[in-house]
Image (cartoon, rainbow, N blue to C red):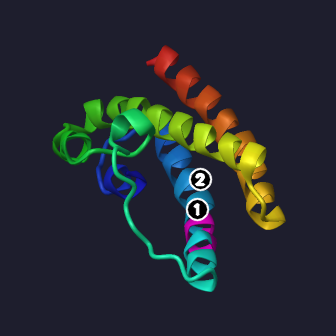
Amino acid sequence: MSDTLLSKDGIDAPIRELATQIKDAQQPEIDQLKQWLGDWGAAETSMPGMDHGGGMMSESDMTALTEAPDAEAGRLFLEQMIIHHEGAVVMAQSEISDGKNADAIAMAETIVATQSDEITVMKDLLAGS
């Protein structure tokens, strides 16, 4: 999502900065999760039913963001990323409650804290636009 937004011109600087921050924070998390899956002998699979209602972007959401005019793309990115983050927070809270691996629980705690803060920033940006 961030890459799609960052490829557009005319995006407000605070939204562009937030997209960069999100991208920079999530890539190491993704890399670590993939490493753990490999270490644990688990396959990387998509999770059924994880359309945007579960926090993941649907193909139609990504298409809408890709095709949105620059001025609308910033707003759409914020709206979609809030939903994405809210889904991640729910999943991370589940890991905190039910997880067994201390490192995964620590990552989940970080995700809850950082993405909750980013949700607040995104809502503030939407309110100001």
Q: Which residues are magenta?
A: 28-32
> Vertical placement of 2 versus 61: above or below?
below
**In this rendering, position of residue 90 left or right of residue 1:** right
Q: Residue furthest top?
A: 127
Q: Secondary structure at mark 2?
A: helix
* Percent of width and height locating residue 85: 54, 39
> Vertical placement of 57 versus 72: above or below?
below
Task: Estimate how packed mark 2 is, as few (under 14), some (14 to 19) or many (20 or more) residues with alpha carbons within 10 Å.
Answer: few
> Vertical placement of 105 versus 66: above or below?
below
Q: Nearer the viewer, residue 126 or 82?
A: 82
- Label for residue 126? none
Look at the numbered discs 2 and 1 and tell me whether their residues touch, using CB distance below 8 Å.
Answer: yes
Which amino acid type is marked by label 1? Answer: Asp
> Vertical placement of 41 versus 60: above or below?
below
* Percent of width and height locating residue 37: 57, 76
Q: Secondary structure at mark 1?
A: helix
Q: Nearer the viewer, residue 35 or 117?
A: 35
- Label for residue 24? 1
Q: Give the residue displayed 54% in from the left and 47% down from the top.
A: 17
Q: Give the residue displayed 77% in from the left and 56% down from the top.
A: 105
Report the residue marked by disc 2.
21
